[in-house]
Image (spheres, rainbow, N blue to C red):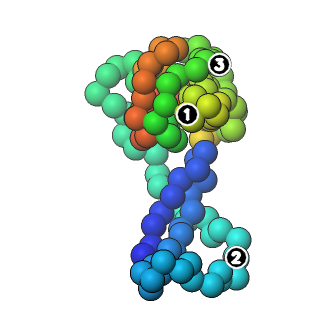
Amino acid sequence: MKNYTITVNGSVYDVTVEEGAGNGVAPAAAPKAAPKAAPKAAPKAAAASGSAGSIKIEAGAAGKVFKIEKNVGDAVKKGDAVLIVEAMKMEIPQVAPQDGTVASINCAVGDSVDAGQVLATLN
């Protein structure tokens, strides 16, 4: 069994994955349990750039920037879409993890992004 911590739209989940016997037959399904939220980490220190905020909004998946919903200086509430990434023909909103003000947008429409890349910051 292996344990992983996965973050989806700002929510953190602890996941345990059981490895099969390797005989090509999937193991019997275990009863499903609701995901258990892990404690959230404290916000990281401000980036070196003077215009960057201390709260990072990172790409949840590799793809292309489809649309930028907010501008620098806009106030956002937790869960507001700041920008949208297109991955595998799906539009995935990248949301504000908490209330704040957009400090920087670090990408442009059409840019290719990697999973975990910082796309924007908030103060």
In whole angstroms, how far apart are the C-alphas of marks 1 and 3?
17 Å
Q: Please, what secondary structure does the residue beneath circle 1 have?
A: strand
Which quadrant holds residue 44? top left
At a point 69% along the width and 32% down the height, the residue shown is: 80
**Amino acid at pointer 2:** Ala
Q: Is residue 62 left or right of residue 12?
A: left
Q: Given the current orientation, which residue lies at the most extreme front position?
A: 24
* Quadrant housing residue 23: bottom left
Reply above or below: 31 against 54.
below
Asked if the residue at tag 1 contacts the one at tag 2, i.e. Cβ–Cβ closer than 8 Å, the answer is: no
Residue linked to disc 3: 69
Vertical placement of residue 33 versus 93, above or below? below
Residue density around tag 3, few if under 14, some if 14–19, many if 20 or more, within 10 Å:
few
In-front residue for pair 24/34: 24
Left or right, 75 with reference to 111:
right
Q: Which is more foreground, mark 2 or mark 3?
A: 2
Q: Is residue 44 left or right of residue 33?
A: left
**Which residue is most to the left?**
48
Question: Which amino acid does the dot numbered 3 rest on?
Answer: Glu
Q: Which residue is mark 2?
A: 33
Q: Is residue 41 visible?
A: yes
